[in-house]
Amino acid sequence: MATEPIPASRPIEIAIVLRAKVMLGIVHGLTDLFRITDDLSRLRLGVDAPVVRLSHFADTGAGGIMRTFDTVSDATGGSSSDVPDVIIIPPCETAALGIETDRRWSDWVTARHAEGAVLGSICGGTFLLAQTGLLDGRRATTHLICAPDLATMFPAVHVDFDALLTEEDDLITVGGVMAWTDLGLVIVRRLLGAVAMMET
C-alpha cells in the first residue's frame, strides 16, 4: 500500500491564473476538482485544517496581480505573501493564442517560478508559458490545432505534436481544452499521492 504524504504545516496552494477572456469553464472545473480533493483529503486524514488551498490570481490594474479568490484566510493558515506551490495557466477565448502584448503576466509567472512554484499550462496557456522563456530547450505540448503556431513562434521549444501531456519537475503542459482534467489529476498525484488522485 502506498504511503500518503502528510499535510505540511500550511496547506498546499494551487493557484489559477485569471487573464482577460480566460475560459471560465476550465477555471470552474479545476476549482471544483481541487475543492473536492481538499474535502476528501481532510476526511481521509482525519484533519479539520485545510490540506489544499485554492486561489485565483487576477490583474487588478493599479493593485497589480493579486489573489482575488482564496479558500484559506489568514486566520486559517494562509497569508497574502505566500508563494503558490503550483500555478496553472488556462487558455483564453481569444484567437491571440494567449500571447501577452505586455510582459506583466509572463514576468509574474517567471518570478513565481524562481521562488519555487511548479507551473502548469492548458492548451493555449502554453503560449504564455513559452513567452516566459522557461520552455526553451524543453518539451511541451498544446492543442493540436495550435501546435504548429507554437513551434513557429517559439522555435527554442521542443513542441511534441503527439503528446497529450508533458511533465517535468517544475513544468507541466497539457494539450486540448478538456485536458484540464488530466492536469488536475496529475497535480493531485504529485502533491498528495496516488490515493488522493484515485479518490478524486
Image (cartoon, rainbow, N blue to C red):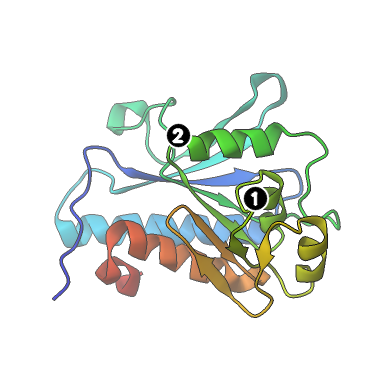
Q: Position of residue 119 (x, y in %)?
A: 52, 50
Q: In which quarter of the image is residue 9?
A: top left
SS at badge 1 = helix
Residue indicated by mark 2: 115
Q: Where is residue 73 in the image (x, y as percent from the top left)?
A: 37, 31
Q: How crowded is mark 1: few (under 14 residues within 10 Å), some or many (20 or more)?
A: many
Q: Residues within 10 Å of mark 2 (few under 14, many from 20)?
A: few
User: In this image, 43 relative to 58: left or right?
Assistant: left
Can residue 91 be seen by looking at this rendering? no
Residue indicated by mark 1: 129
Q: Position of residue 49 (x, y in %)?
A: 23, 43
Task: Name the image quarter holding the C terminus.
Answer: bottom left
Can residue 177 be seen by looking at this rendering? yes
SS at badge 2 = loop
Which of the pair 156/46 is nearer the observer? 156
186 to 91, vertically: above or below: below
